[in-house]
């Protein structure tokens, strides 16, 4: 476009110079004068063109400079606004970090108070085994093997040789891990793992189960917090005994701690056996109700009878019912061409899970060992499974367990056995 404009102007200048020279020639000027006039006029036109172009170029340059300055001012204003927003954001983040730090410090302080009190009770029990056993007869009347096992349990608690195991609970049929069940395992001084069937016989009569339960509860809460930081949406079933529910010293402390951590509701499910649930007294029922008022729920395991008052379970905020796979299969029988449950002969077996769901209770079939059992449970519309087929109980790693460890004065430290990762 600029080249075309320049060509047109050049043509106009030539025409103007030619007209002037012809006018002079017509007026009587010699040809030499006409040629000189033509050249001079053409030079004058180009000089005027250069001056005019320079003027317009200067004006355009000044306009560009003004535009750049305006853009710079706008950019500077935006930078100042962004800087102010960043400053405000940093202040908010710093305030939030300070708040979280204060909340964490408060929680740790509360936990330390709790485990200090638990430690005092544990030391009294360990230092006075004879007094604890007095209602059941003198210590000397117990079999030597029982005395030895009791000492092993006491030493394991005193030396903090208590490991936490987790076993996955999966949804069916996808088999995706949605919960874990926690187990406590004691180790003797040689590192051998003592199974519950081995130490329960002496730990329960001596009142040591409350200490084991308390330590398990403490670690479960800390592990749930760790999983939450990793954004892992899973929950943990944590066993709780009647002794812990009825403990008027420990339970108020624990309830206060859970009240400060109501965000764990739904991630921590307290579990007790069917027999323990049926034997609970007013104190235990009241304490369960207080936990439920915070949003926590319960699970019933060690089920030996499926003829259950589901309405009573629902009132007690029991949301899960664990039934052993083999027991469920043994309960199935055929009557009048229908597959029913022996304990509930009026109910089709396939309707059992839907019946419990009407009361807000999910059935979890546990101790699943074979694929055939899974297929039969799916026919019964059971939504969750647990057992070695889906994953054996595994000890959490030392690094993870260290994060869930009570203060050193709760249990006297001892070298830990290397645990399997989970």
Image (cartoon, helix red, strand yellow):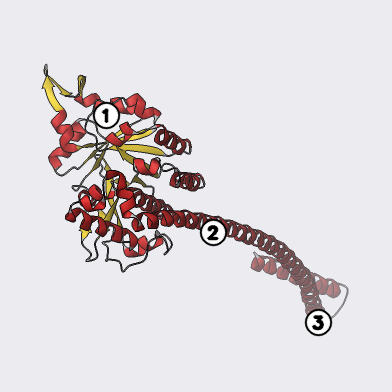
- Give yes or no for contact between labels 1 and 3 (Cβ–Cβ under 8 Å): no
Element at label 3: helix
- Give yes or no for contact between labels 3 and 2 (Cβ–Cβ under 8 Å): no
Identify the residue shown where x is 28% and y is 50%. Answer: 203
Q: Position of residue 138 (x, y in %)?
A: 26, 49
How far apart in space, not on screen, are marks 1 and 3 (Cα)?
116 Å
Quarter of the figure with the N terminus: bottom right
The local crowd at label 3, few if under 14, some if 14 to 19, many if 20 or more residues have their Cα within 10 Å, is: few
Identify the residue shown where x is 22% and y is 29%. Answer: 305
Pointer 3 residue = 36
Element at label 2: helix
Name the foreground residue: 6 vs 136.
136
Pointer 2 residue = 105
Residue at the farthest top position:
336
Pointer 1 residue = 353
- Image disc number at residue 180: none
The local crowd at label 1, few if under 14, some if 14 to 19, many if 20 or more residues have their Cα within 10 Å, is: some
Mark yes or no: residue 339 visible.
yes
- Asked where in the image residue 285 lies, by quadrant, the reply is top left
Q: Position of residue 390 (x, y in %)?
A: 21, 47
């Amino acid at each position: 476009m600029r080249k075309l404009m320049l060509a047109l102007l050049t043509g106009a200048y030539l025409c103007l110079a030619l007209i002037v020279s012809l006018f002079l020639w017509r007026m009587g000027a010699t040809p030499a004068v006409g040629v000189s006039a033509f050249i001079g006029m053409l030079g004058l036109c180009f000089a005027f063109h250069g001056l005019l172009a320079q003027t317009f170029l200067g004006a355009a340059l000044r306009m560009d400079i003004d535009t750049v300055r305006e853009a710079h001012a706008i950019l500077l204003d935006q930078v100042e606004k962004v800087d102010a927003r960043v400053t405000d954001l940093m202040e908010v983040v710093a305030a939030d970090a300070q708040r979280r730090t204060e909340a964490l410090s408060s929680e740790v302080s509360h936990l330390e108070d709790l485990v200090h009190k638990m430690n005092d009770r544990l030391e009294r029990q360990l230092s006075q085994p004879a007094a604890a056993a007095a209602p059941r007869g003198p210590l000397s009347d117990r079999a030597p093997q029982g005395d030895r096992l009791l000492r092993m349990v006491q030493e394991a608690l005193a030396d903090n040789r208590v490991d936490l195991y987790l076993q996955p609970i999966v949804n069916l049929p996808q088999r995706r891990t949605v919960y874990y069940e926690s187990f406590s395992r004691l180790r003797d001084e040689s590192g051998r793992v003592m199974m519950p069937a081995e130490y329960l016989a002496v730990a329960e009569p001596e009142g040591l189960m409350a200490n084991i339960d308390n330590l398990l509860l403490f670690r479960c809460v800390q592990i749930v917090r760790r999983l939450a930081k990793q954004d892992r949406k899973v929950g943990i079933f944590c066993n709780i005994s009647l002794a812990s529910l009825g403990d008027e010293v420990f339970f108020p402390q624990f309830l206060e701690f859970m009240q400060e951590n109501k965000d764990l509701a739904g991630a921590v499910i307290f579990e007790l056996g069917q027999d323990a649930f049926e034997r609970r007294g007013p104190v235990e029922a009241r304490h369960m109700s207080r936990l439920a008022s915070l949003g926590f729920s319960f699970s019933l395991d060690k089920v030996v009878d499926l003829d259950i008052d589901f309405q009573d379970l629902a009132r007690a905020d029991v949301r899960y019912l664990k039934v052993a796979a083999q027991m469920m299969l043994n309960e199935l029988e055929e009557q009048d061409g229908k597959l029913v449950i022996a304990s509930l002969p009026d109910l089709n077996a396939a309707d059992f899970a839907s019946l419990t769901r009407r009361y807000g209770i999910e059935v979890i079939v546990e101790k699943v060992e074979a694929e055939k059992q899974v297929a039969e449970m799916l026919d019964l519309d059971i939504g969750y499974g647990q057992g070695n087929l889906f994953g054996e109980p595994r000890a959490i790693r030392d690094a993870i367990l260290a994060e869930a460890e009570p203060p050193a004065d709760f249990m006297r430290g001892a070298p830990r056995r290397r645990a399997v990762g989970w």
